[in-house]
């Protein structure tokens, strides 16, 4: 019993010693935690103090920068934005030049290949102004007979034909003036028949006129059919063929419209073949793209839209009618064939010698070109050169830098494209010259 009590007491003593040991360790850990907490608090206070010093230093730095630069924060921001804008503008100008150069190289290479193949196979003549016709007389005595007693013969001629008969001091000639080529041709042939017959009086004039008009109508039908055969577009409605024949007596800027249409049809067929488009659709639309001009004196509206409606009326497909309507951008281009017709129309008109141009139209085009370029900021002088095929723009070097000059040429070219109608292309050259002058004394 006593042994058991001693063992228990010994066990209790060991337990107490372990408890005391644990309490001592806990006290040491608690002291360590308290020390760490104090250290963290001190560190936090130091960090707050340093953050305050840093903020104050930053404010001092900003104030010093303002004092040195003489700029407020808002003004400094404006300077930075301006510098950023200049940098972006420089990059954009460089990118524009790079993209244009790449596109030009690729387009020129492809276009030269296609157009050289197409154009070398088509030949055309030169244009001549045909708003007047001249009938030669054997002698000036015939002028009195053409005029007739109290002018009754010439009045009859002008009333029937709708053409002005000009009898003046021009030796041995009568000038017929009028914009309707068919009427002018009827008047010319009627007068020649009267001169050959020798009988010139109102009744005979009327008889000759109707006979000539019938012959011209037959001639129109024959010319239209021949044009269809030359263009190799298959069968065409007889009424469309007659309208094509009327174009034989119509000119545009001195270029015979029927010859222009046949040339366009040939070009369109070749170009469509190169581009993988429908050759038949392109050629038919190109041949008939100007038939609206044959009825321009009868129907109001742009000739492209009028021609498209006529084509639909006589059974042409929607693709052909659309290409006809779109060749002057009266409607939006939706097919490759429409683009082909627009291209060949410009090619035929731009060919050297294809079209004539009056002095008034020529000078107006030059004035318009110079006006478009002059309205841009920084432009000093503008010169239209090479018959309006090039504009040279001289700018103020202190107002326009090199990057702005590149963008300026791009903007002027786009404005010309939007506002003017012309054949071919117009080159825009911006010249920026900087001169430094000093004197040796």
Image (spheres, grey):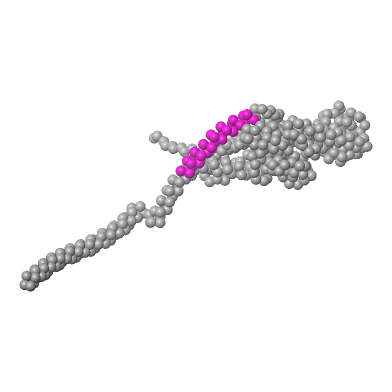
In which quarter of the view is residue 275 placed? top right
> Relative to 30, is 348 on the left or the right?
right
Task: Say left or right for 10 vs 341.
Answer: left
In this view of the protein, can residue 183 be seen by the observer? yes
Measuring 73% from the left and 34% from the top, which residue is drawn there?
Answer: 233
- Residue 421: image quadrant is top right
The residue at 65%/30% (across/down) is 119
Query: In the rendered view, does 257 fall on the left or right side of 148?
Result: left
* Closest to the observer, 136 or 99: 99
Q: Residue drawn 65% across and 41% down?
A: 335
Does residue 169 appear anywhere in the picture? no
Which quadrant of the view contains residue 359?
top right
Majority SS type along the magenta span: helix
Which residue occupies the extreme left position in the image?
Answer: 2
Where does residue 240 sit, x and y in percent of width and height?
78, 39
Q: Which residues are magenta?
A: 90-118
17 w.r.t. 173: above or below? below
Nearer-the-camera pick, 45 or 238: 238
Residue nearest the observer in this picture, 431 or 145: 431
User: Which quadrant, please, contains the C terminus?
Assistant: top left
**Side of 382 where 357 appears, left or right:** right
**Residue 129: in magenta span:** no
Report x, y in % for residue 198. 91, 30
């Amino acid at each position: 019993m006593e042994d058991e009590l001693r063992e228990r007491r010994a066990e209790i003593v060991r337990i107490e010693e372990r408890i005391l040991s644990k309490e001592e360790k806990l006290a040491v850990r608690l002291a360590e935690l308290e020390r760490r907490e104090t250290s963290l608090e001190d560190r936090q206070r130091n960090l707050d103090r340093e953050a305050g010093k840093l903020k104050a230093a930053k404010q001092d730095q900003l104030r010093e920068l303002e004092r040195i630069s003489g700029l407020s924060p808002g003004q400094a921001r404006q300077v930075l934005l301006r510098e950023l804008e200049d940098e972006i503008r420089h990059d954009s100008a460089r990118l524009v030049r790079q993209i244009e150069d790449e596109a030009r190289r690729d387009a020129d290479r492809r276009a030269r290949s296609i157009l050289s193949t197409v154009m070398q196979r088509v030949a055309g003549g030169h244009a001549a102004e045909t708003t007047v016709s001249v009938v030669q007389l054997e002698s000036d005595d015939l002028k009195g007979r053409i005029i007739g007693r109290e002018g009754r013969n010439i009045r009859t001629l002008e009333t029937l034909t709708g053409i002005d008969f000009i009898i003046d001091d021009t030796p041995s000639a009568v000038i017929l003036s009028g914009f309707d080529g068919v009427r002018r041709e009827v008047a010319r042939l009627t007068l020649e028949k009267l001169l050959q017959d020798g009988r010139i009086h109102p009744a005979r004039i009327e008889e000759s006129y109707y006979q000539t008009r019938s012959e011209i109508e037959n001639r129109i039908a024959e010319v239209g059919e021949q044009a269809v055969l030359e263009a190799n577009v298959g069968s065409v409605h007889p009424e469309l063929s007659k309208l094509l024949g009327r174009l034989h007596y119509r000119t545009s800027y001195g270029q015979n419209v029927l010859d222009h249409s046949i040339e366009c049809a040939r070009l369109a067929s070749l170009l469509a073949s190169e581009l993988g488009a429908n050759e038949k659709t392109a050629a038919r639309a190109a041949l008939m793209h100007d038939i609206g001009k044959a009825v321009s004196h009868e129907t109001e509206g742009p000739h492209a839209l009028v021609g498209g409606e006529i084509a639909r009326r006589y059974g042409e497909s929607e693709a052909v009618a659309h290409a006809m309507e779109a060749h002057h951008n009266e409607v939006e281009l939706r097919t490759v064939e429409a683009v082909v017709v627009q291209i060949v129309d410009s090619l035929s008109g731009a060919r050297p010698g294809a079209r004539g141009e009056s002095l008034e139209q020529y000078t107006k085009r030059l004035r318009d070109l110079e006006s478009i370029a002059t309205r841009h900021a920084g432009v000093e002088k503008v010169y239209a050169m090479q018959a309006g095929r090039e504009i040279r723009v001289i700018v103020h070097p202190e107002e326009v830098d090199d990057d702005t000059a590149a963008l300026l040429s791009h903007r002027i070219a786009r404005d010309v494209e939007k506002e003017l109608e012309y054949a071919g292309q117009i080159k825009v050259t911006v010249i920026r010259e900087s001169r430094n002058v000093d004197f040796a004394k």
